[in-house]
Each structure stands twice: as structure tokens, then as C-alpha cells.
Image (cartoon, rainbow, N blue to C red):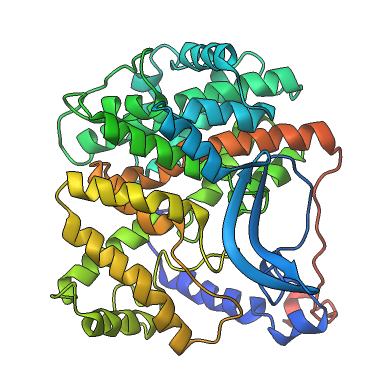
Amino acid sequence: MAERNISEITPEILELSKLCQEYNGIDTSLYTKYDVKRGLRDVNGKGVLAGLTHISEIQSSKEIDGKRVPCEGELFYRGYSIRDLVKGFINSDRPGFEEITYLILFGKLPNAKELKDFSDLLVSYRTLPTNFVRDVIMKAPSNDMMNTLSRGVLTLYAYDENPDDISIPNVLRQCIMLISVFPMLSVYSYQAYNHYICGDSFYIHNPSPDISTAGNILRMLRPDMKYSKFEAAILDLALVLHMEHGGGNNSTFTTHVVSSSGTDTYSTIAAALGSLKGPKHGGANIKVVEMFEDMKQHVKDYDDEDEIKLYLNKLLDKEAFDRRGLIYGIGHAVYSISDPRADIFRAFVKKLAEEKGRQNDFKLYSMVERLAPQVIGERRHIYKGVSANVDFYSGFVYSMLDLPLKLFTPMFATARIVGWSAHRIEELINVDKIIRPAYQCVLDRSEYIPLNQR
């Protein structure tokens, strides 16, 4: 038999795919009939309550006179407002990643000694096994860094002398190690891709024990290892803002589901990475950047509201960019009036744009942020308002920091591994049941027909 090209969609596969579509489509009216919450959300977009948590809280509405009314979005880590947390480390001119990681993992803000000891602990784990870069990362580099990151995580299982122990001390050890090495796995995977697939020079810079997580990312990524203090500060801020976002987001819920089965930490985090890779989740900021690049090809005057509105309408009409009918970075499953992460980011993004000489790009982003909700409101019936979400600005920030597009989602993962770790530990401590929701079968019974009679 001839060897099969695994990437080829053959006529046989095309024909079988028609069967998939014919026999798997479900009448959407049945979701209403059986009161099934599609996507685990009700008709107003509110998520089905699936668990309890101490870790974080999202607030997008308030109850006034017995009715839920949209409000300015708020995000709380362990009960602390994200706005206050960011103000705390920014005003003190220190990085926030290590401090907020401590808070999310352990539930309390560290004092100076606790923060120093924890930062030193992260540094001690910031190393990969001997020859791991050569034997794992440099072999079979992938076009997709998230797949490479998942492979790296799963391979680390083989280097762990106690990988399947799900006692809390052992899981905490594994999580702290993964939090520490995610920047290395991400950047080194990109360097391998950039060399072996793109043909550019190959270099591996070791992380420094004396600088922050954000600083090390820029140090390892750049050929000359140089970066400004403000560049490190805004990347650090991006990591903090992406670190955690309630238990109901797709990848965190995946973490709970897989953890509930009793499996190991490496398998759990790999599953979460698979979820985050999706363009409806962690890949959204890439779509924002690509959309704006397309927009700049068609919009000549960044001050012309009518020209920008025309392009935005073409997006909704599936006549521009990827023809999906979406304005990427606008709207959120939970927030309506505002996303607090975008609110916090905005002033820093403006300052970085001025530093990088990209004021015109920032002007275009600002114009779209203002006009897109108007255009969407005029064109579509929506049950809640829409506003810019954190992805609207994060991709722009990464591009100004010269992070390659391939690393945008791994940067999200480098932050969110903290939240996943906290939720995995919370699941293991509090719940001893496997998560198993119900699905209603809506197909009639069939009589079996012998093969020779079909």
C-alpha cells in the first residue's frame, strides 16, 4: 500500500465529511425545548454556575431595584481590585508578576521577606533539564509555538521522578516549576522555529537570576539582550493583567475538568494550553493585529470617521479581512460597558506608542475603540453593550515590544499558567468528584439492519 500523505484531504475524506455534517447537525430549536444552555451560557450570556472559587471574581453588572444592570467592569484577584494591585506595584516602581503570582497561589499579599523568598524560589526553578533544549526543543520545531509549548510540558513529565503524585505539596512543586520555565520554553521554541524553519540565526540566552520574569523574556528573545526599563514594565503589566480571569473562562474550566479526573499536572496544563490556543480564546490578540494591518491597507486617513466606519461595516458584512463578520478585540463574553484590563492598559499603551514613534497607529486604535461599539449597536441587536477588551491592546503592545506574532499566545500562557495552577490546586483540595455534565440525546431509536441488507 502506498504511503499516505497525512496532510492531504483525499476524495474519500471529503465524501466521509459529508456524512459527518449530515448526521451530526442538531436542530437549534431543540436547545430551547430542552432548556440547554449552549456554551454553558444562558440567553443573556451569563455563565452557568459550575463551581465556587476564592481565586478571582469578575463584576460586569449590579443589582438595582431587583434588576441586573450593566456596570463598569471590575476584576478582583483574591478579593483585591486589579486596579489597586496594579497601582500598588507601579507606584512603587517594582515588577508585579512575582508578587501577584504569590497572591493568586497562596491567597495573601506577601510581605517583603515572603516576596524575596518566593522570587528566589522561582529563580531556583528557572532551569530546564540537561540537554532539554537540544533533545526536545531543537528537534522537530513547529510552525505553532503553542503546540511546541504543549509538547515541552508533556515531555517534562518524563524528567519528573514523581509525576503522578497529586498531593498538594507535589502539585505545588510542579506548578512553581512550570511557572518558572514557561518563558524559556516559549522563547527557545521560537528561536528554534526562527532558525530551522525561517533560516535566521540561532541563539540561546540564559535567563538572569537578577532580573524579573518580564525582563528575562526580553533578554532571552533579543539578540543583544537589551531592553528599556519601561519595556520590561509594560510587559510585566501585560502578564499581570492576563494572569487570571475567573474560573469560567475556557482554559481555566478545562483545568478544572481535567484535574477532576485525577490526572497529572503535565497532562492538565497541556489540555489548558490546547484550549488557550483557539482563536476564540488566547489567539484573539493575533487576530486584532492582523485586522489592523488589513485596515491600514484600506483606510488612508486615520482622522476620517466615515472612512473608518465604512471599513468596520465591511467587517460586519464579511467583506473585509477574514470575512468572519467580526471586529476583533471589541466585545467580551462577560464585560459590556468596559473591560478593566483594557482600561488599565490604555494609558500605558499610549506612552509606549509615543516612545516607539507609533502615535498614528495608536490614533487609529483609539478611533476604532470609539467607533466600533457605535457601528455594532447600529447594525446588530445585542443584549448588552460592547467595549474594547484586553486583546484589543495586548497585541499592539507585543508588536511595539518587537515580540513576533508567533509568541503572542505563548505570552498569554506564560501569564495564565499562574491562574491555571491556582485553580488546579483549588479543585484538588475541595472537590473529589469528576466533572461530568449531562447531554440530552435528541435522536430517535433505530432498528439494527444486518450488513448484507444495508
Quadrant of the image occupied by residue 314: bottom left
Quadrant of the image occupied by residue 113: top right
Above or below, 120 against 193 in this view is above
Direction from residue 98 to residue 317 in the image, left or right: left
Direction from residue 43 to residue 245 in the image, left or right: left
Above or below, 217 against 288 in this view is above
Residue shown at the point (19%, 41%) measured from the top left: 198
Q: Position of residue 447 (x, y in %)?
A: 85, 80
Q: Position of residue 308 (x, y in %)?
A: 25, 78
Residue shown at the point (36%, 68%) measured from the top left: 369
Q: Is residue 319 visible?
A: no
**Camera-nearest residue between 87 and 32:** 87
Q: Position of residue 66 (x, y in %)?
A: 81, 74
Residue shown at the point (38%, 75%) measured from the top left: 372
Direction from residue 57 to residue 355 in the image, left or right: left
**Camera-nearest residue between 391 and 28:** 391
Q: Position of residue 193 (x, y in %)?
A: 28, 37
Total marks in image: 0
Direction from residue 384 to residue 210 in the image, left or right: left
Name the quadrant of the C terminus: bottom right
